[in-house]
Amino acid sequence: MVDGGLYIHFPWCVKKCPYCDFNSHPLRDDVDQGVYLRALLQDWDLQQRIFHPDFAERPFKTVFLGGGTPSLFHVQHVNQLLELTAGGADEVTMELNPGAREYGDLAAYRQAGVNRLSIGAQSFENPMLQALGRIHDADQTLTAFEVARASGFNNINVDLMWGLPGQEVAQALSDLRQAIALEPEHISWYQLTIEAKTEFAKRPPLLPVDRTLLDIEQAGLELLEAEGYRRYEISAFAKPGRECLHNLNYWSFGDYVGLGAGAHGKLTHRGRRLRTRQASQPRLYQSDPERLGVQDIAEDELALEFMMNALRLVQGVDQASFVSRTGLPWSSIAPTWQALVEQGLVHAQHCGTTPMGLRYLDSVLTSFVTTR
Ligand SMILES: C[S@@+](CC[C@H](N)C(=O)[O-])C[C@H]1O[C@@H](n2cnc3c(N)ncnc32)[C@H](O)[C@@H]1O
Ligand code: SF4
């Protein structure tokens, strides 16, 4: 078993949402999915040759089909990809936009080996969905969820966002209650952020004031907890034993292979810690999937990179995993850590934040930024 995950990116959506800075492009008629599949297979061959000549006999623990909107990817293509890469994986997740299920039915994806779905609900209020530029309404989300269950999916995540334009506490809680009523195994509850270069950055909507955001967050966390969804990462909540294994690997700074336009990977190879990155533009990627960027993670960035992931986890990780995952001794950050302990932001014996440290994670992380 390769100790890590495989991420496969599908870079198209029916329409670009105004808040989104993921590598996604509007799906035009001239997109040939067969060409993209061939590029993915070439990418896979290349990375197999470079990093793990024995990929094929050592299945990944987890596979994640992300996007963009991978549920637009023809099921026969998904099937072909998973046959090659996912045999023996414990968790195979696919993101699903409730408005984009034109190709194949969910049972066919289940048959192809997808065993976990992540449904992009975002909100259950139709005017809010419109303000977010979504291509679906709340009924379509409910239908997608129902069809997913009927198709044999017993591990489903629902993505919701909060802090939406003009949102009041009651509206955010109502969204959460409607998600909880579906009884998904997992809920991702993201605060809307305005990302540079998005439509929302150019024409910012009026977001709730800080006081309202704090009230939404506090009430939402209480509600999720009371309904049996344990917070294990800043925005991730799961029923017992239903945490997302793929993301847990990212957050514990584990290795993963990234395939597809704009996909990046992180690999420990012959004692080096490497980042891989593919061209973002689908056309460029398809024209030469072998133009893979491979770079060592600079030694003075390793501690920050590790902490940016591990400290998102509510329980943190043990200090030994800092040493094994970065190759650095704990003593290299001990003085910084001690200063944070004294401010009550992190634990003394364990690589994790206190509740206050989690709330002010950005300032905790600045302590690990090194200036060259
Ligand atoms: C790749 S998208 C999910 C799949 C699919 N493309 C969709 O939107 O339904 C990942 C999730 O990130 C969240 N997200 C995207 N942009 C965000 C932003 N600016 N602020 C907060 N959450 C965001 C959304 O909840 C979204 O469902
Ligand atoms: S559908 Fe998902 S990936 Fe595509 S633009 Fe919208 S949020 Fe981004």
Image: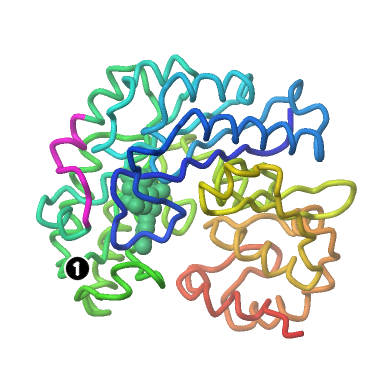
Disc 1, SS: loop
Residue 190 position (above or below residue 53) = below
Task: Identify which residue is drawn at 60% across, 59% down.
Answer: 309
User: Residue 191: image x %, image y %?
Assistant: 34, 63
The N terminus, quarter of image: top right
Comparing 336 with 350, the one in front is: 336
Could you tell whether 124 is left or right of 260 in the image?
left
Residue 298 position (above or below residue 5) = below
Number of numbered markers: 1
Amino acid type at image mark 1: Pro
- The local crowd at label 1, few if under 14, some if 14 to 19, many if 20 or more residues have their Cα within 10 Å, is some
User: Residue 171: image x %, image y %?
Assistant: 14, 59
The C terminus, quarter of image: bottom right
Quarter where residue 351 is shown: bottom right
Could you tell whether 331 is left or right of 172 in the image?
right
Residue that label 1 marks: 165
Quarter where residue 195 is shown: bottom left
Question: Is residue 229 shown to the viewer in this render?
Answer: no
What is the magenta range?
Answer: 133-143
Q: Is residue 204 magenta?
A: no
